[in-house]
């Protein structure tokens, strides 16, 4: 039972609950003698942390990371890297009234059915708070990938029915929704505020792209690059669908439209188009990896909802006062972006190190 471990050559174990003393991650497999300091981790955590804007949760967490092991005088040792992030802004008393209530859309009921016990405070281990540990680990993976000129970026492709029509990377971090289309960013933000004011929430689509990925990564048949990417993305809280390349659009196309012709150009074998999203047969082609994920509306809303308590008694659930509702995101796509980037970094890094062991001199 290793549901808290991820990866093979570059392996992480995350730990902690939303309202516990801290959360953290242990990384095993990081190469030695690589420059690494807490500032490298912190810049990614700052992108994910709560309270960034008026359209995210008001929970106040600084998300300050502390490296406990695996680094000496600013360089990795090749030994396990352990990182700690304290929980400081949790207000557990706000959850006391819902101690015995199974919140609609949340995981208390399924955790109870599996374990016979659960932490009712903020979702416990099922909380998106856990993703901060993933982002910390992903920051280390990014350092390894940067040595190979591999870069990863993500953005909010869609919120509700509002979709970005162009991708300007310079725009992504300039607006609170992390939309690459400045015109649509304003529409997305307005929609999120409207939904929030109605006491509701809304979903969307996040897209993640990796550039500079070499051809040949992926371990058929069960550890295909696309299989591992799909698992990584589906492990993120609130993600309910994944597509790679043309994805579900391929179901409406003919083979003559969807196939990517092979060409030999600039001294290398490559595809003319990239409908496959940079992966064929579970192995990277050398083109960009393109992944999109469907993110459901956050489950905590201000509107009353039907549910039952632990005794099976029907109850009407609402999060309580307006302050409690404000401590939850009306749309989590902007904060999912750095998490999805981190998960892609972890997968690509893992497969890069696995390929090095297979063909070390290439």
Image (cartoon, helix red, strand yellow):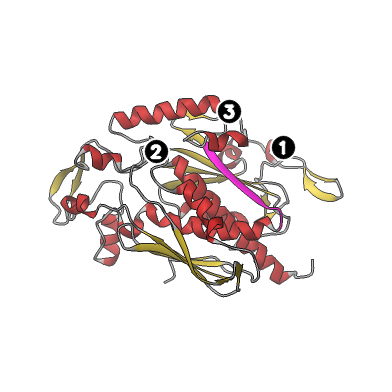
Kindly indicate the quadrant of the structure image that contains residue 202. Answer: top left
Identified at 69% across, 54% down, the residue is: 284
Give the mark nearest the N terminus, 3 or 2.
3
Give the mark nearest the N terminus, 1 or 3.
3
Quick one: SS at disc 1?
helix
Check if residue 283 falls in the magenta segment.
no
**In contact (CB < 8 Å): disc 1 and disc 3:** no
**In contact (CB < 8 Å): disc 3 and disc 2:** no
Query: How far from the left and from the top, in percent, is residue 301?
Result: 28, 39
Identified at 68% across, 39% down, the residue is: 258
The residue to which callout 1 is attached is: 256
Identified at 57% across, 69% down, the residue is: 8
Position of 325 compared to 86: left or right? Answer: left
Quick one: SS at disc 3?
loop
Position of 283 compared to 160: left or right? Answer: right
Count of marks, rendered view: 3
- Label 1 to label 3, Cα distance in Å? 25 Å
Q: Which residues are magenta?
A: 148-156
Query: How far from the left and from the top, in percent, is residue 238?
Result: 40, 47
Q: Label 3: few (<14), some or many (≥20) within 10 Å?
A: some
Q: Is residue 17 above or below residue 203?
A: below
The residue to which callout 3 is attached is: 165
In this view, the mark in front (2 or 1): 2
Q: Is residue 89 above or below residue 359?
A: above
Query: How far from the left and from the top, in percent, is residue 316?
Result: 16, 42
Q: Label 2: few (<14), some or many (≥20) within 10 Å?
A: many
Q: Name the quadrant of the C terminus.
A: bottom right
- Label 3 to label 2, Cα distance in Å? 20 Å
Query: How far from the left and from the top, in percent, is residue 20?
Result: 31, 62
Q: Name the quadrant of the N terminus.
A: bottom left
The residue to which callout 2 is attached is: 331
**In contact (CB < 8 Å): disc 2 and disc 1:** no
């Amino acid at each position: 039972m290793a549901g808290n471990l991820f990866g093979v050559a570059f392996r992480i174990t995350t730990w902690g609950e939303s309202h516990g003393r801290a959360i953290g991650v242990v990384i095993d497999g990081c190469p030695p003698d690589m420059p690494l300091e807490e500032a490298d981790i912190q810049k990614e955590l700052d992108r994910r942390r709560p309270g960034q804007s008026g359209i995210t949760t008001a929970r106040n967490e600084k998300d300050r990371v502390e490296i406990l092991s695996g680094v000496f005088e600013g360089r990795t040792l090749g030994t396990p890297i352990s990182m700690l992030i304290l929980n400081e802004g949790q207000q557990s008393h706000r959850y006391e009234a819902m101690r015995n209530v199974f919140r609609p859309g949340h995981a208390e009921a399924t955790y109870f059915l599996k374990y016979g016990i659960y932490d009712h405070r903020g979702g416990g281990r099922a909380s998106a708070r856990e993703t901060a540990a993933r982002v910390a680990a992903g920051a280390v993976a990014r350092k390894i990938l940067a040595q190979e000129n591999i870069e990863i970026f993500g953005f909010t492709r869609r919120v509700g029915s509002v979709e970005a029509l162009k991708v300007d990377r310079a725009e992504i971090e300039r607006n609170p929704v992390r939309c690459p289309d400045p015109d649509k960013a304003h529409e997305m933000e307005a929609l999120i505020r409207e939904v929030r004011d109605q006491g509701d929430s809304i979903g969307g689509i996040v897209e993640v792209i990796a550039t500079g990925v070499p051809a040949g990564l992926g371990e058929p048949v069960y550890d295909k690059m696309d299989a591992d990417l799909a698992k990584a993305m589906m492990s993120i809280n609130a993600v309910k669908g994944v597509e790679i390349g043309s994805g579900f659009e391929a179901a409406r196309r003919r083979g003559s439209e969807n196939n990517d012709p092979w060409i030999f150009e600039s001294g290398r074998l490559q595809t003319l188009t990239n409908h496959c999203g940079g992966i064929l047969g579970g192995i990277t082609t050398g083109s960009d990896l393109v992944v999109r994920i469907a993110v459901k509306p956050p489950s905590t809303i201000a509107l009353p909802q039907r549910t039952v308590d632990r005794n099976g008694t029907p109850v009407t659930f609402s999060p309580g006062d307006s302050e409690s509702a404000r401590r939850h995101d009306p749309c989590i796509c902007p904060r999912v972006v750095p998490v999805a980037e981190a998960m892609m970094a972890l997968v690509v890094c893992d497969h890069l190190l696995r390929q090095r062991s297979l063909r070390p001199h290439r």
